[in-house]
Amino acid sequence: MQKTAAKKIQSNDTNHHALKAGLIEAVQKRFTKSQPQIKPFITQLFNRAVYEDLEAYRAEDLARFIEDAFATLQKRKSGEMLLRVETELENRVTVIEVVNDNMPFLVDSTMAALAEKGHDVRLVLHPILTVSRHKNGALTQLYGEQPPSGAQAQRESFIYIHIDAIDPAAIEELKAELTKTLNDVRLIVKDWKPMLHKLDAAIEKFKLSPPPIPVAELAEAIQFLEWLRSNNFTFLGLREYKITGAGAKLSVEPVNKTGLGLLSDDSVGLLRRGSKPVTMTEELRHFLRQTNP
């Protein structure tokens, strides 16, 4: 029975692969020889697509979607994010396109933002494109996986998503949410290594100039920081603080211009509950007075 089930799954996979290949070929035939770069774009866009996600669409629908997506790709300067959100009434879907410098967390963060807003996702495609651009950002060449030797190419993330159709007001709200989310991702990625350097410096300081605490406590602190450093923690932001005052007047104050990642924005508070600062309780003051690292 297990062998029979395995054969059926393999047969379905083969059948779906053939159906997907036929659908892609039908889409490509809708473009003329005067549009040479759009065909490799189609191949890369659908390369890892699941056939079940595509079978709800006709070839002419996909061709129309691709033409719009390829138009979005045409001009983008390095460091810039392109975002297009538009409802397509014929298929009752809202199309989301995001073109960005290739970096970690883009898809996960986008999907999390959509889930938080309760959007039902129908289709997700995410090719990493290798392109050349003019200094003004205009697309000059779209390559395959490996560009020719010596080509001035860059890697770009192209996120393509369909969700259930939403109205214009919801589109503007979604665009604002995605813009904020993806700008946050850029901040985090930009400051990723500086945050790790700060952590390395803290570890080194504990080792070379340890505070006057028991050896076991010091060793535990160092081991914990080294565990964080070994890809067990995602650093979103870092900022230095100093403790000022004493007794009932003890407070925690940020050190200017030490923020990295999400905390590089001085308006982003750390000790907060929602939009309000956390009340400085006696228990919190007691904790901050401790010498244990």
Image: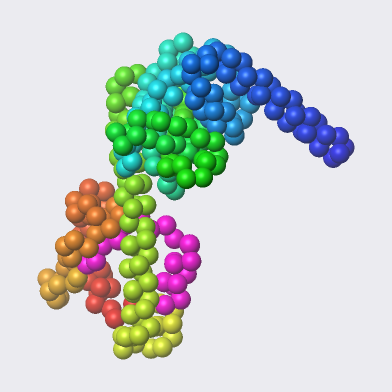
The residue positioned 67% from the left and 20% from the top of the image is: 22
In the rendered structure, does residue 265 fall within the stretch colored magenta? no
Q: Which colour scheme is used?
A: rainbow
Magenta residues?
Answer: 222-241
- Vertical placement of 178 versus 215: above or below? above
Front position in the image: 150 or 87: 150
Q: Percent position (x, y) of residue 274?
A: 26, 48
Q: In the shown orientation, is residue 247 left or right of residue 274? A: left
* Count of marks, rendered view: 0
Q: Quadrant of residue 181?
A: top left
Residue drawn at the location 48% of the way across and 62% of the way down: 231
Give left or right: position of 289 versus 99.
Answer: left
Residue 270 appears in the rendering: no
Q: In which quarter of the image is the N terminus?
A: top right
Rendered-image quadrant of the C terminus = bottom left
Q: Which residue lies furthest to the front in this view?
A: 150
Viewer-proximal residue, 186 or 162?
Answer: 186
Task: Identify the residue shown where x is 54% and y is 36%.
Answer: 144
Q: Is residue 238 magenta?
A: yes
Q: Is residue 247 visible?
A: yes
Percent across and percent down for residue 233 are 44, 60
- Residue 62 percent coordinates (x, y): 53, 18
Q: Is residue 48 above or below residue 214?
A: above
Question: Between residues 194 and 210, which one lies in front from this camera angle?
Answer: 194
Return the x and y of residue 54 as percentages of the image width and height.
Answer: 59, 23
Could you say which quadrant of the image residue 139 lies in?
top left
Q: Residue at 79% across / 29% down in the picture?
A: 11
- Quadrant of residue 51 in the image? top right
The answer to whether residue 4 is left or right of residue 271 is: right
